[in-house]
Image (cartoon, rainbow, N blue to C red):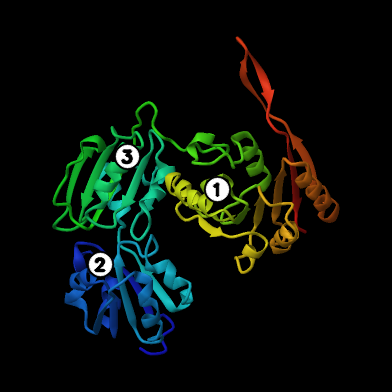
Amino acid sequence: MRGDPAWLAILGIGEDGVEGLSSPARAALAAARAVFGGARHLALAAPLIQGEAIAWRERLKTAIPAILARRGEPIAVLVSGDPSWFSLGSLLAEHVPMAEMRIIPAPSAFSLACARLGWPLQRLTTLSVCGRPLAALIPHLQPGCRLLVLSADETTPGKIAALLRARGFGPSRMHVLEALGGPRERGRAVRAEEFALADIDPLNLVALDLVAVPGAVVIPRAAGLADDLFAHDGQISKREIRALALAALAPRRGERLWDIGAGAGSIAIEWLLADPANTAIAIEAEPARAARIRTNAETLGVPGLEVVAGLAPAALVGLPRPDAVFIGGGARCEGVIAAAFAALAPGGRLVAHAVAAETEMALIAAHAAFGGRMSRIGIERLAPLGRLHGFRPAMTVTQWVAEKP
């Protein structure tokens, strides 16, 4: 009825169709004047649909304006499984108050997979590559871990197998679970190094039991990745210095970083690896380096890194506000430090490094203007000394750290 505060029902539906719907879900579906969903969802629910059936043709979020245009009418939206898990429920909740909507979930594909495999859901990592890059799996490839991955289509399992082989996880066991919960359900298991499955249903999930061979490429969980994991031309914060920079930047969940004069992008990449909810923008004036940053981000599993090819401070104009800023190059350029500090949100951190004396002078001036703390960092590495060995000092790095009030 128009005016009913709970006009919108978001219903999870499984491959068992209307038989798996609860009584409240059935009632909401039958009462809806319009039912939105994918063609597959509408076919599954067809016996109970009384109103207009409206199929969306593109991504889920493209249906939101049409749903909101009918605000106040009894509307039902059909999605797979749990509407709040990689689905439309949480997106609609950003536009519709919870008092005006009901979310009635069905078992998610993740829950059904665990029910088939006997795996504890609370100990697993759950991911989706539906509309997301496969490279996002890379940080999660850890020996002995288990992943559940929602596939984009029938080609996804083969692509995952190829990724596992390329990174030294060939012995990993893959469970390809198709059309879970319905009459077409099928499950097959194979090792990634032997993957040759054909005729895979487009609706599938891949469960991974990860096993690594010696020398597998594993992304460590701590800051300070090995330098040789990054493609670079020498313009890179070395791993020990980088670890200290990340410690000073102190990434927190959901924060945004500006990496100014990003070089190889190592600081921004490790910022993103610190938490999947973090975002980062790498600003680099040299086009070849900017391209290399994009490659490094893809290789290390953070393809969402935004790269801005330009020179600060001009390149900073219009960028979304940062919670933290790292200046690894260009700190002595006029206006860069002031612009970065001004852009910071309250409580934001700015960390800048200098090797050249001229850049160090710029940091000393910034310290006088904005406060904070300064340190000098010296690293020595073992190197040949004739027929013997000795420790050779690397260039000393001056670090300035300031927090915006």
Q: Secondary structure at mark 3?
A: helix
Residue linked to disc 3: 164
Which residue is painted at 60% across and 65% down in the image? Answer: 320
Image quadrant assignment for residue 233: top right
Q: Is residue 347 left or right of residue 264?
A: right
How far apart, in angstroms, are the residues tagged by discs 2 and 3?
Answer: 37 Å
Q: Secondary structure at mark 1?
A: loop
Disc 3 residue type (three-letter): Leu
In the figure, 96 relative to 197: above or below?
below
Question: Can you give x and y, in whole percent of width and height, for residue 362 in the image?
Answer: 79, 50
Does the image show residue 165?
Answer: yes
Disc 1 residue type (three-letter): Gly
Residue linked to disc 2: 21
Image quadrant assignment for residue 139: top left
How packed is label 1: few (under 14 Cα within 10 Å), some, or many (20 or more)?
many
Of residues 241 and 208, which is closer to you in this image? 241
Q: Earlier in the sequence, mark 3 or mark 1?
A: 3
Q: Is residue 36 left or right of residue 303?
A: left
Which residue is painted at 38% across and 68% down in the image? Answer: 88
Quadrant in which the N terminus appears: bottom left
Image quadrant assignment for residue 92: bottom left
Question: Can you give x and y, in whole percent of width and height, for residue 201 in the image?
Answer: 18, 55
Of residues 221 and 350, which is closer to you in this image? 350
Which residue is painted at 44% across and 79% down in the image? Answer: 100
Quadrant in which the C terminus appears: bottom right
Q: Nearer the viewer, mark 3 or mark 1?
A: 1
How packed is label 2: few (under 14 Cα within 10 Å), some, or many (20 or more)?
many
How far apart, in angstroms, are the residues tagged by discs 2 and 1?
Answer: 49 Å
How packed is label 3: few (under 14 Cα within 10 Å), some, or many (20 or more)?
many
State the mark number for residue 265: 1
